[in-house]
Amino acid sequence: MNRYTTIIIVCLVLLGSDLVFAEPFSEVATPFEEIGTMWFDSLNVRFVGNWPFGPSWAVAYDSIRNLVFCGSGGGVFILDVSTPSSPINISEGIRARGFVRSLYFDEPSQLLYIANDVAGLEIWDVSNLLNPIKLSFLDTPGLCGDVFVSGVYAYVADGYYGLRVIDVSIPSNPQEIGSYDPQGSATGVYVSGSYAYVTFHVYGFRVIDVSIPSNPQGVGYCDTPAVAQNVYVSGSYAYLADRWGGLRVIDVSVPSNPQEAGYCITPSANDVFVSGSYAYVADNDSGLRVIDISIPSNPQEVGFYYTYGYARSIYVLGMYAYIADYYRLWIIDVSSPSTPQEEGYYDTPSGEFSVHVSGFYAYIASSESGLRVVDISTPSNPQDMGYYDTPGYSEGIYVLGSYAYVADGTLGLRIIDISTPSNPQEVGYYDTPGVAKDVYVSGSYAYVSDSWEGLRVIDISTPSDPQEVGFCDTLDDARGVYILDPYAYVANGYAGLWVIDVSIPSNPQDIGYCNTPGFASDVYVSGSYAYVADWTDGLRIIDISTPSSPQEIGYHDTNEALGVKVSGFYAYVADGYGGLKVYDVSTPSNPVWVGLYDTPSSANGVYIVDSYAYIANHSCGLQIYENLLVGVEESKDVVYHPKIRLLQNPIRGDYIELEFYLSQRDNAEINLYNLLGQRVRSFSFDELSTGKHSLKLQTKGLSSGIYFLRLESGLMNQSVKVTIVR
């Protein structure tokens, strides 16, 4: 989905001397460069890496190798199910850039097609399970929700942009060749013969003639009573999952005149798979429903299995049904359709809410999945290290020494020993009276923002036996907490920022507040200022130099500010579906928006280490970005121009022409990176003289798209965004 916004690059006028022609050197990390019309927008921030796994939403099957591909957030787990009772994760190598909505596996070619929501269609070669290779992506104009492959064409249900027909005869270079865009949002697609059968949300079901793929034509339509989610075609019938309308059976023997033949009401049908005389329905929070369709005009439910989650997608082969139900991949024995039974399951992560980085590890509060530990020693390729499934709903986390302190919702504070990151173990807990939302540790105390039960002060000097020693009623919904002795700063919902004196832990006292206009969700203190994530009212900056009388001095609107951290002159805001936002707060009364990166899901929490931003990305795990403005510092001893001047941007030819100024003789290196952070060009210059330098850098062979050009010398590090248009 193209969401590029206007790119503004401010350049200083530079004066000076020589023209240098640079010889190119290319270093491409993979055979596929993820650039061009990629869906995300960015400014002064680059993508570094991710561990994107989250709720399970999609499933596909490889019958030759007994494998299940389980779409999990923004990634795909490859599971060996040769022993159905004990599925084994054999690869986490498939890491997509959006949220995995649907999967289609083509056995002959060993290609996996991913319907990737806002990030379009991705194609992966999975012939080598330990090293799956991303061959390509195609940025569809809408929300890529489902995909079906027939012959050399992929048919995509692309939300409000209807059906898109993609030529995949060259998997490394998919090309859209046709589309059909009627009223409504395309949600599911199935192709049989010369027809594509497409569900259109509240606008029912359409039959589309795709005999000429470049010119698909609607030939038939049938309305449904509810919300048409997906479709499966078998013989002369199309079986529709129609949410609260249940299973609808449509006679498509005459494609131009589809007619409902029968139906079976289920609570909330999301997906359907037909095998033999039965339709198997993934029925959201009602689990698996098994429906006898031997008489299409009178389908009857004969069995069900409650999967505990939200059944979204289903695949059936032989005696097993494989169901993605948000929290896990279920394997259900359906050999007796009237009494389906659990055979096995594989847990997947849930939504990520906050993240804390310590050393080489990121510790993530992962809602129903508890605490997750991710090795970030190689930021471009984070690896799952271990997890501990807390009993509650973890939303906040603080790490100090060998312990992680988790705010675990209705089950209070959990203390987890992380001395062995691959095997974290709970050693103690204290069940707070409210809903633990966040935690901050200082000295021997953990300070817990406990929703409507205010701020709780817990003595953790004995980690195995934490005890509450004091509390302060904040009269509202305490969400975030930050300690700067002797004060606790609480993001207190609709009551704004509260300042609490905790110098006597057994008797904390509120001493001041600043009522922000929105819903205060998080707070970070730096120097004399508190930075508050105020939900739809953005970033608020509050002067706390007088703790009893905090005063707002600056603000900047955002999308839905949920988390905030400050490092140096920059405030980083986890801005919900607005992604990561970066603000220059060197003048706190006038914060300036200087960076952004759209994230694939809601940016809920953020943690900063040096120039890296670690984002807890709700449905898409951990996303890592780099602020390219960090490191741009002026020496107090020399004076130089802090900007590169691009003589043309966008770049429409085979060269980037730029100027920069050196205040003294120096070496310089210029690197060009794509949006994956892969270096695609490198230029080195030795012993450049004092003054202005004009460079002409060759870009021949690079695709259209957005790149980051970084100049590094002994005097400065500078980055600018470059757009190449072919």
Image: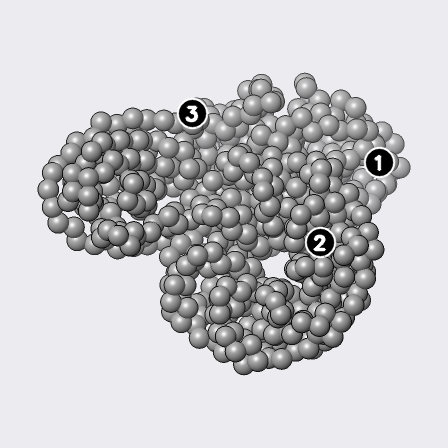
The outermost residue toward the front is 637
Please tell me in which quadrant of the rendered image residue 421 appears: top right
Give how far across and how far down residue 501 sits, in percent.
65, 74
> To which residue does mark 1 refer?
342
Viewer can see residue 355: yes
Mark 1 lies on a secondary structure that is strand
Disc 2 and disc 1 in contact, CB within 8 angstroms: no
| Dot 2 or dot 3, earlier in sequence | 3
Give how far across and how far down residue 449 sits, in percent.
69, 65
| Dot 3 or dot 1, earlier in sequence | 3
Q: Is residue 270 above or below residue 171?
A: below
Query: Which one is in front, 161 or 597?
Result: 597
Name the amino acid, label 1: Glu
Viewer can see residue 180: no
Mark 2–mark 1 Cα distance, whole angstroms, equals 32 Å
Mark 3–mark 1 Cα distance, whole angstroms, equals 42 Å
Mark 3 lies on a secondary structure that is loop
Name the amino acid, label 3: Pro
Name the amino acid, label 2: Val
Query: Which one is in front, 274 or 434?
Result: 434
| Dot 2 or dot 1, earlier in sequence | 1
* Mark 3 surroundings within 10 Å by alpha-carbon count, few (fewer than 14), some (14 through 19), many (20 or more): few
* Mark 1 surroundings within 10 Å by alpha-carbon count, few (fewer than 14), some (14 through 19), many (20 or more): some
Mark 2 lies on a secondary structure that is strand
> To which residue does mark 3 refer?
31
Please tell me whether mark 3 or mark 1 is closer to you in this view.
3
Q: Is residue 530 above or below residue 335?
A: below
> To which residue does mark 2 refer?
406
